[in-house]
Amino acid sequence: MRKDNCKMTLQRNVIINDTYQVRQVLASSELAIVYAGRDRNTGAKVAIKEFFPQRMAERQADKRGVFCSSRGYGGQYQELLGAFLLEGELLSKLDHPHIVSYLDHFEANGTGYLVMEYCTGITLTEYLNEHNHALDAAFITETLLPLVDTLDYIHKQGILHRDVKPSNIMVMEDGTPKLLDFGSATRWPMQSGEKQVIFTSAGYSPLEFYSEKSSQGPMSDIYSLAALLHYWTCGQPPMDVKQRLFQDELPSVRSHNEYVNPWLARVIHWGLTVRSEKRCASLAWVRSSLRVQAWVWKVRKPGTVEWSLAENQHTQVYEVESKKQHEMA
C-alpha cells in the first residue's frame, strides 16, 4: 500500500451493508483490500474483500465511499468493478471443500464487496519456504493432488480460475489446500469475439492471458499449475512466457532438482509450452505424474541409493507415457 494507507482503508468497526463489521486489514493488492470482519447476525469471523483500484480510486470524506478520482478513467473503473462483481457471482456457484466458501457479495458506497469464509492457514509460498519446498510424498497427497482435483472441479463447472499461483493458495493446518482469489476468473467456454479483462502474474500466466480475445481453456490454468510445480521443485517460477516467444528453450526441472521423476519433469515442461495448442490439455497427466512421484518418495527417500533404484524402476513407464504425450501434442 501507499504511505497514506490510513486514508485508503476502511476504519476499524465500520459497518457495511448493516451486517458486516470491519475489524482489521489483512492484505491489499492493486485492485482490492481484504479485511478481517465479523457478521453481526451470527458472530462469525469473515473475510471482506473491497474493490479499491489504488491507481484510480480515492476514499470519500465520509471515509466509507469510494470514487474514481482519475479523470478519463471512469469507464475503466466500471469495467474493473464489473469484473470484481463477477468474482462473487462465479464463486457463489462453487461448493468444494478446497475452495474458499462464498457468503455474500453486493454493491455499496460506490464500490463492490465480496464476503467469504475466514481461512486460518498460511499461503503456499510461505509453506514451501518453511518446509524447504516439501520434497515428500505427504505434501503431494495432502496438498497438490487435492489442488489438481479442485481445478478439475472448477473446469467442469464451466469456470477458469486464470490466476493459479502459490500466493493464491492457502495451506490449512491439516495440510489441505484452499484455492483463493477468483478475481481473474471467467466463464468457459467463451463466446466468439468475447473480450476478457487482462490480468496477468509474471511467471505464472500463459501467453493467451495477455490478449483480450485469445482462445483460453483448461490448458491455460494447466500452464499456471505447471508454473506452480516448477516453483515447488526448483524454488523459483519459470522464465516468463514473454521472454520465451522467439526461443522457447526452458530447461527441464531436473536440471535444478535431480529428485524429480522424469515423468513429472516431462509433464511440467509440457504444461509450460508457449503455444497453447501444443500444451498439455488434461489434468489427468498432471495427476498421474504426481502420483508416481509420491510413490517413489514414499518408498525411498530422496538422496539415497534406494531412491535411485526406485526411480529407475519407473524409467520404462516414463518412456512409454512420454511417447503417448508426444503423439497427443
Image (cartoon, helix red, strand yellow):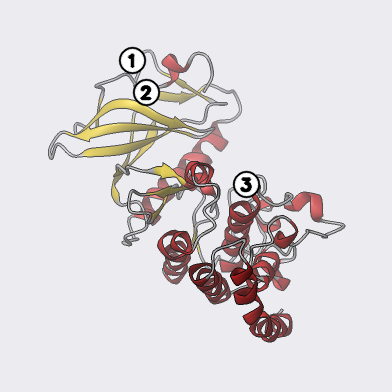
Q: Amino acid at mark 1?
A: Asp
At a point 32% along the width and 42% down the height, the residue shown is: 120
Inter-mark Cα distance, 2 to 3: 28 Å
Q: Amino acid at mark 3?
A: Thr
Q: Secondary structure at mark 2?
A: loop
Q: Position of residue 71 (x, y in %)?
A: 59, 23
Badge 1: few (under 14), some or many (20 or more) residues near its Cα, within 10 Å? few
Q: Nearer the viewer, mark 2 or mark 3?
A: 3
Q: Secondary structure at mark 1?
A: loop
Residue to which mark 1 is pinned: 62
Tag 1 and tag 2, C-beta contact below 8 Å: yes
Position of 120 relative to 148 (above/below): above
Q: Amino acid at mark 2?
A: Gly
Badge 2: few (under 14), some or many (20 or more) residues near its Cα, within 10 Å? some
Apparent side of residue 103 relative to residue 157 in the rendered image (left or right): left
Of pointers 2 and 3, the one earlier in the residue sequence: 2
Q: In this view of the protein, which residue sits in the foreground, 269 or 201?
A: 269
Apparent side of residue 47 relative to residue 156 in the rendered image (left or right): left
Q: In this view of the protein, which residue sits in the foreground, 129 or 309?
A: 309
Position of 154 relative to 292 (above/below): above
At a point 59% along the width and 64% down the height, the residue shown is: 222
Q: Secondary structure at mark 3?
A: loop
User: Residue 20 sits in which quadrant?
Assistant: top left
Q: In this view of the protein, which residue sits in the foreground, 145 or 115?
A: 145
At a point 73% along the width and 49% down the height, the residue shown is: 240
Inter-mark Cα distance, 1 to 2: 7 Å
Badge 3: few (under 14), some or many (20 or more) residues near its Cα, within 10 Å? some
Q: Position of residue 174 (x, y in %)?
A: 33, 53
Residue to which mark 2 is pinned: 65
Of pointers 1 and 3, the one earlier in the residue sequence: 1
Residue to which mark 3 is pinned: 200
User: Residue 13 sits in which quadrant?
Assistant: top left
